[in-house]
Structure formats: structure tokens, C-alpha cells
Amino acid sequence: MSEQIDTAIRWGSERIARCSESARLDAELLLAHCLDKPRSFLYARPEQSLSEASWQKYQKLVQERLKPTPIAYLLGAREFYSLEFSTTPAALVPRPETELLVELALQQIPRQQSFRICDLGTGSGIIAITLKTERPLADICATDIDPACLELARENARRHEVAINFIESDWYQQLPAGLEFDLIVSNPPYIAADHPFLALGDLPAEPDIALTPGTTGLEALQQIIGHAHEYLVEGGYLMLEHGYDQQALVADLLENFGFSEIRCENDYNQLPRTSIAKLVDNPNPRA
């Protein structure tokens, strides 16, 4: 006889506890996914027996979780800013901290007029798609160096029925000549390659290219800030997610490249996470 829902959850929780601080939640999400039911169904029918197929599928997913494989990859989806996005191992798992970047960007984007935005290193497309959903009049392009990420981002854009210009590009390099933006946003990789943090939790299962740009962790931020003036209009904004310990270094870079009104906002854990700056002294204005 197959396992009941409540005993299956206990079985999964005990095993997942080896790799997760939210073992019961993980177990419930995986079981609900196997049953194609909401989590509330598990609470309403704790003594219902699982089919043999559901039990086998659930056991396989629990074993995958132990590798560890992020829940978002196993479920194939993750919520971000109240929207659901498809997720695959090609892109970084969407994180709540990045919602701060979206909120701050929305404060700068007018509702009733066109506004040109570039999302650098779009990954699964969560920033660009959320901004377009919230500000339909915005004209948004999004870049990524990885074709697999762009395929995923395009799938998510179709899912939410938004039109975004996706471009395969190493940061700015393949952007068409003459493009100018009112706002550039980015959540680039910013963890140093030898940082022990990269070995913790689910991070070993996520793509290195989305987590670390090199030895210092500042390489991508330096590129983005250093060339932003070539693509921002005077008075345009640059918004960047970065490491909690990189605030001062990012502020120095921004000031060195003609930005002012530089400020940093804390994330939901009260850690400095998102820097915002305005380009008021463009050292290389377009003709």
C-alpha cells in the first residue's frame, strides 16, 4: 500500500533537512507539485493515499533536492513580484532581494509616457518583464550573453504577454549603435570567485556565470558603470544590485564616471543592496 500524504511529508522533511532550513515547506511544495494540487490540498486530505506513480515521482524529487537542487528548478517555476516565472538551471533563481531593484526602478518610470530602459544580464527576464507589466508604455530591451537564458526570458515574456527586445550581448557590446536609455538596470554577478559563500546552500547548483564575474567580484559592476555614460541620456539613471559589502566601492565608481545623487537602499534584511545614481555630467555625450 502506498504512503499517505502526511507520512510522505514527514518522510520528505526528515531527508530534506540535511540541505534546507525550510525542509517541511520544501517537502510540501514537492508533493503538491507531484499531485498537481495546491498546498492547501495537503492540509485538507492528510490521510489520503498517494498513487504509486505520485509516490515514486515524489521520492525522485526529494533525492534531487538533496544534491542539492534548488526547489525552483525542481518545480520549474518561482514567484517574483506576484508574478510566476518559469525557471531552469540556465538562469539564477529569482530572489526577493531583487524585488527592491524593481520597486526602485518603478519609482523612476512614468506611467503615462514612453521611457527607454535597458536590463543588462536579464537571466530569466524577471526584471524586464515585471517592469513592462507594471509600466506598459515603457520601451524595454534586455541583454544576456547566454542564449539559453534568452530562450527562457522569451518564454517568460510570452507567458506574461509583454513585448521586449531581447539581445544576445556581453553587457553593452552587441547593442545596436545609437541606442540611448533613460534608465539602465542590472543585477549582475558580484560574488568573488573564491568566496566561501559560493559553496553554501543551493548555490553550487546555480550557474557560475550568474554568480561570480571573477577574482574581485567587482568586474561586471566596473564594466556596467564604466560604459553606462555611452548609453544613458544626460539625466538618466543607473540602478544596480550588488553585494552588501560593496556599497562604498560602487559609490566611488559611480562618482568617478560622472554620476551624482548617488544613494544606496537596504534590502529586506536591512543590508545595503541597491545603488542608484543619476548621470548629470556625461563625459562622452552623443553628438
Image (cartoon, rainbow, N blue to C red):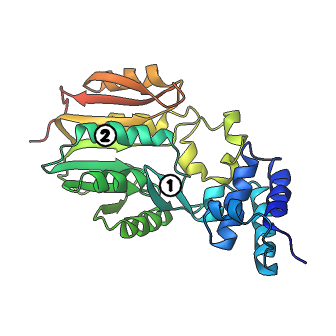
Q: Mark 2 points at which residue?
A: 105
| Disc sitting over residue 79 in the figure | 1
Asked which quadrant contains residue 74, the reply is bottom right
- Of tags 1 and 2, which is closer to the observer? 1
Left/right of residue 257 with respect to residue 14 in the rendered view? left
Give the x, y percent position of residue 249.
45, 22
Residue furthest toward the left? 287
Give the x, y percent position of residue 262.
31, 22
Amino acid type assigned to the residue bearing label 2 in the image = Ala
Asked which quadrant contains residue 3, the reply is bottom right
Amino acid type assigned to the residue bearing label 1 in the image = Glu
285 lies above or below 29: above
On-image quarter of the N terminus: bottom right
- Give the crowd class for mark 2: few <14, some 14-19, many >=20 residues within 10 Å: many
Residue drawn 47% across and 51% down?
Answer: 80
Label 1 to label 2: alpha-carbon separation: 19 Å
